[in-house]
């Protein structure tokens, strides 16, 4: 007689899996990676390779020898953290700093909480902020694009956001803007900045791919970009000399990378559409507050980490719309 | 026609309607049938025959016990060989009547001719009575006694009849086959139900993967108060609450029934059975069952006598394939896995689906990555990931306030989870515990 399996329904599954989702995100990052290699050449290749390999290695070592669980270093999540960490570092950063960043990202950001699914803060951003505080000079000298064969010896300069921040105290914003790359160049990523954050158009292509594959929903990127646009737009309308054009804010700094890839990290973002909208709007507002009124020229990484901290609260109080009115049972 | 659908959640599993377009084939009865006395939601019926009795097809063998219960009839003629405990499709051993088949002698009052009786001569009360006598239950799978739904509670008013021709479960095609082959009888059946309920309007909902059934039913209902509405293919559209939402944009309240928003829903199989009961005086002794599976030789739609062993159906469809991991009574999303093939087809058996090893394989469960897919697909607006966490921590009061009792157990959450987490299993556990809490509160 045939042996039959008896188990509760459902008896069929979608075939979706964590590696499929993670590798989907990785595929969506390829256009931005290509553009960054085009601008920053060998530096981008070295930083990315070191970051990805060390993230995988630390994940493996910590799982195997410290947590003593079955290593899942190839499920795609460590590779993704490595890629995202590399994307938010300058392409001329010494490789040993990248290794420290990877250890902070995987070790502190992810594994101390118990690994994938349990971490409160986005691991790649934990790594970035760790490096930012530890090595402020290396983390703020940005290579000029187009130096393919230069790595740590590349000529450096300031980012558009930093120039704007220093400039508006003395001169009208419009005048500073006129000396910067055109909006088209900003859109194409031809500016100084972290290696993977510059090319807005390539990041947007990646977003479209993720939306098409239904890896992410529109809520978080749209609410972040929308709230930044509205907030900076209001400020700009009030005083265009003191505050930059909202388009400038959208296209510079880490905003696109943050809105599309960092803030949408499954583990650290809210579970409901409404919660995501609040989270995204909050990130947008805090980003602008830091950029314009804070001490740093860019604030998106801090804004995301702050709202990562709010995620459990949002999950507790923001509920999806239930089907049907509630009536007393019985 | 503009297709409608429900707004919240849902998934789209591969349809795999392998037996679509196969004509309904009458299956000759097996040598022995086993007819359980508990084939419906409600009180088991009371057996009124004894071992050794001769019975005819359509003869009453167990009588309804109370209002929420149904009559059960002999589906074959022959001798009652046992009244005993038999395993049924739920896996439990329950009381059933075993009949050794001898000939095919029917109760004389049943009209066995093929002529269509169009004129409905009975009034609402008589219709209800006939349906009680015939032992009709919801044939979509829920097996709730039909006469109960035909009795509108005091203070409520039925406005619409909705006929469920959605068949959103993958693989199943029995309702599709009925709509294609028995459309005229279905039309009369719908009119009977409308008369029984006292409603003026009826809507038949059919998913757009059955365009032939949509046009057939549209054609036949032209000039009547019955409208046919095409629906986008989305699971679980055949769920009552989802179907009412899709067709009328009304939301059945939490813990409520469609009648709370003026609607009564019947499956097309139920409507067909009502036609036969009211117009042909034929009790519910047979039904259409889809027998299907990827490796089955001849996926088929059979007309089967109640009580026929499942093994007989599979043999008639080409035999059990070697690569069979599970045999499902019902569809793959909500059906129940059978422990044995010797159990009988009952009133609620809409299909027998053979699941191969590859399809049945559950991947290793890993940590929740909070991807939000389960929240996105839940058609009731619940948070399955949270329910599972709460159930694991035995926080059942909190599960109640999160409205776990609203869960319709459609399985969309487990189906979609990339971490292969058994979300629905834990939700079921929570529902059972919350139901206990509610009962104990009432008892105080």
Image (cartoon, coloured by chain):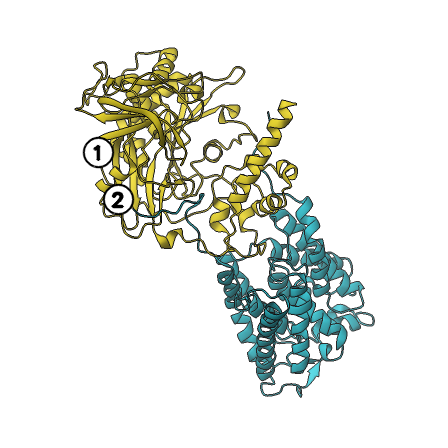
Chain colours: A cyan, B yellow
Chain of the residue under label 2: B
Q: Position of residue A60 (x, y in %)?
A: 58, 71
Give the number of marks: 2
Q: Left or right of B345: which side holds B109? A: left
Q: Which residue sits furthest left?
A: B103
Rendered position, A6 above or below B440: below
Q: Position of residue B17 (x, y in %)?
A: 32, 45
Q: CA distance from mark 2 to mark 1?
A: 14 Å
Rendered position, B386 above or below B98: below
Q: Secondary structure at mark 2?
A: loop
Q: Left or right of B164: which side holds B25? A: left
Chain of the residue under label 1: B
Q: Which residue is mark 2?
A: B299
- Whether residue A253 is visible here, answered yes or no, is no
Q: Secondary structure at mark 1?
A: loop
**Which residue corresponds to the image point at 63% horizontal and 45% vertical from the top-left?**
B393
Q: Which mark is residue B101?
A: none
Q: Which residue is mark 1?
A: B27
**Which residue corresponds to the image point at 39% horizontal and 11% vertical from the top-left?**
B125
- Is disc 2 in the same subunit as disc 1? yes
Q: Position of residue B271 (x, y in %)?
A: 34, 25
Foreground label between 2 and 1: 1
In the depicted view, which residue is nearer to us: A259 or B148?
B148
In the depicted view, which residue is nearer to us: B280 or A278?
B280
Rendered position, B405 above or below A11: above
Residue B426, by quadrant, is top right
Q: Pointer 2 and pointer 1: residues touching (CB < 8 Å)?
A: no
Sequence-first disc among 2 and 1: 1
In the depicted view, which residue is nearer to us: B125 or A292?
B125
Q: Which residue sits furthest right?
A: A170
Quadrant, the C terminus of chain A: top right
């Amino acid at each position: 007689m045939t042996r039959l399996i008896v188990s509760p329904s459902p008896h069929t599954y979608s075939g979706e899996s964590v590696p499929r989702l993670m590798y989907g995100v990785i595929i969506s990052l390829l256009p931005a990676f290509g553009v960054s290699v085009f601008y920053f050449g060998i530096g981008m290749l070295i930083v990315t390779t070191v970051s990805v390999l060390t993230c995988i290695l630390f994940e493996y070592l910590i799982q195997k020898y410290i947590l003593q669980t079955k290593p899942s270093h190839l499920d795609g999540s460590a590779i993704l953290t490595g890629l995202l960490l590399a994307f938010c570092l300058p392409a001329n950063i010494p490789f040993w700093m990248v290794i420290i960043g990877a250890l902070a990202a995987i070790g502190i950001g992810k594994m101390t909480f118990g690994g994938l699914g349990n971490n409160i803060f986005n691991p790649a951003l934990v790594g970035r902020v760790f490096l930012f505080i530890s090595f402020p000079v290396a983390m703020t000298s940005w290579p000029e694009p187009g130096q393919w064969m230069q790595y740590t010896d590349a000529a450096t300069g300031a980012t558009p956001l930093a120039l704007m921040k220093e400039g508006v105290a003395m001169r009208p914003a419009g005048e500073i803007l006129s000396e910067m790359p055109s909006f088209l160049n900003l859109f194409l990523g031809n500016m100084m900045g972290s290696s993977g954050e510059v090319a807005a158009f390539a990041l947007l292509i990646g977003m479209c791919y993720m939306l098409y594959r239904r890896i992410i929903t529109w809520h978080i990127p749209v609410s972040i970009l929308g709230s930044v646009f509205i907030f900076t737009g209001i400020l700009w309308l009030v005083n265009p000399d003191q505050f930059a054009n909202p388009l400038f804010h959208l296209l510079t700094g880490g905003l696109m990378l943050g809105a599309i890839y960092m803030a949408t990290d499954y583990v650290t973002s809210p579970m409901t559409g409404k919660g995501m909208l609040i989270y995204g709007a909050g990130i947008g507002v805090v980003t602008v507050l830091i950029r314009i009124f804070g001490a740093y020229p860019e604030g998106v990484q801090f804004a995301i980490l702050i709202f990562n901290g709010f995620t459990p609260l949002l999950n507790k109080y923001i509920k999806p719309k239930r089907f049907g009115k509630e009536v007393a049972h019985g | 026609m503009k297709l409608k659908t429900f707004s919240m959640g849902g998934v789209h599993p591969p349809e795999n309607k392998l037996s679509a377009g196969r004509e309904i084939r009458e299956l000759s009865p097996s040598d022995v049938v086993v007819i359980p006395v508990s084939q419906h939601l409600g009180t088991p019926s009371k057996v009124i025959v004894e071992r050794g009795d001769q019975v005819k097809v359509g003869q009453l063998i167990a009588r309804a016990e109370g209002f929420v219960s149904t009559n059960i009839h002999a589906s074959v003629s022959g001798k009652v060989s046992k009244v005993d405990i038999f395993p049924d499709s739920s896996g439990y051993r329950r009381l059933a009547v075993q009949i050794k088949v001898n000939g095919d002698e029917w109760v004389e009052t049943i009209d066995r001719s093929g002529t269509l009786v169009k004129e409905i001569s009975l009034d609402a009360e008589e219709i209800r009575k006939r349906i009680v006598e015939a032992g009709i239950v919801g044939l979509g799978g829920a097996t709730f006694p039909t006469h109960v739904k035909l009795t509108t509670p005091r203070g409520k008013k039925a406005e619409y009849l909705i006929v469920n021709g959605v068949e959103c479960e993958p693989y199943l095609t029995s309702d599709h086959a009925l709509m294609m082959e028995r459309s005229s009888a279905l039309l009369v059946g719908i009119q009977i139900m409308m008369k029984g309920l006292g409603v003026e309007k009826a809507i038949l909902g059919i998913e757009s993967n059955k365009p032939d059934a949509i046009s057939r039913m549209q054609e036949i209902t032209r000039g009547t108060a019955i409208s046919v509405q095409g629906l986008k293919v989305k699971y679980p559209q055949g769920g009552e609450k989802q179907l009412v939402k899709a067709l009328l944009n009304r939301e059945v309240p939490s813990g409520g029934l469609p009648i709370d928003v003026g609607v009564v829903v019947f499956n097309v199989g139920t409507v067909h059975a009502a036609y036969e009961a009211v117009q042909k005086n034929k009790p519910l002794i047979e039904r259409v069952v889809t027998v299907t599976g990827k490796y089955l030789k001849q996926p088929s739609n059979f007309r089967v006598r109640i009580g026929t062993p499942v093994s007989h159906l599979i043999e008639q469809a080409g035999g059990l394939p070697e690569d069979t991991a599970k045999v499902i009574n019902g569809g793959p999303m909500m059906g129940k896995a059978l422990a044995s093939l010797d159990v009988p087809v009952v009133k609620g058996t809409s299909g027998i689906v053979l699941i191969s090893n590859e399809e049945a394989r559950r991947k290793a469960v890993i940590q929740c990555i909070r991807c939000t897919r389960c929240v996105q697909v839940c058609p009731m607006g619940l948070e399955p990931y949270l329910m599972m966490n709460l159930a694991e921590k035995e926080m059942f009061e909190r599960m109640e306030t999160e409205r776990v009792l609203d869960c319709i157990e459609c399985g969309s959450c487990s189906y979609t989870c990339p971490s292969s987490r058994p979300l629905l299993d834990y939700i079921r556990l929570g529902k059972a515990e919350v139901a206990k809490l509610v009962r104990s509160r009432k008892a105080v």
